[in-house]
Image (tube, helix red, strand yellow):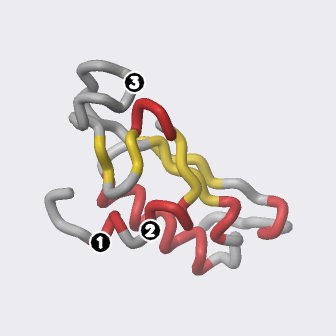
Amino acid sequence: RLNIRDPAETQLFACGPEIMMSYSATAALDRDIPRDNIWFSMERHMNCAIGHCGRCQFGSHFICTSGPVFRYNDVQQLLTIHGL
């Protein structure tokens, strides 16, 4: 079992399948880690790397220009949309 001494000072960084990161965030929130302390590295195929082609668009974000690392707060609702 994970023992967190000071949840307010704990940061979660996750990279991997989006479903796994969502469950990681739920586990972190259950342990009182603040939403602002949860970070996701989002993965998308990129073509242009400047946000022009739209290949890496994730909601209103472009992974290549705004990320790839995002606060959980910024992508939480997007992670609930299947196939996005």
Identify the element where label 2 is drawn: loop
What residue did someone put label 2 on? 76
Q: Which residue is mark 1?
A: 80
Amino acid, disc 3: Ile
In this rendering, the answer to whether 43 lies above or below 3 is above
Is 13 drawn above or below residue 31 in the view shown? above
Q: Is residue 35 above or below residue 49?
A: below
Numbered circle sitting on residue 15: none
Residue drawn at (39%, 24%), measured in percent from left and top?
Answer: 50
81 vs 8, nearest the viewer: 81
The quarter of the image holding the N terminus is bottom right
Mark 2 vs 3, N-terminal side: 3
Image point (76%, 59%), residue name? 10
- Alpha-carbon span between mark 2 and mark 3: 24 Å
Estimate the x, y position of residue 27 in percent, counting from the top left: 52, 71
Pick the front one: 17 or 63: 63
Marks 2/1 in contact by CB < 8 Å: the verdict is yes
Which residue occupies the foreground of this view, 57 or 6?
A: 57
Left or right of 46 in this view: 16: right
Please give the name of the residue rendered at 55% of the width and 67% of the height, measured from the top-left corner.
Answer: 73
Please, what is the three-letter code of the amino acid marked with disc 2? Gln
Badge 1 marks a residue whose secondary structure is: helix
Residue to which mark 3 is pinned: 50
The reply to whether callout 1 and callout 3 are in contact (CB within 8 Å) is no
Label 2 to label 1: alpha-carbon separation? 7 Å
From this viewpoint, which residue is outermost toward the top? 48
70 or 65, which is in the foreground? 65
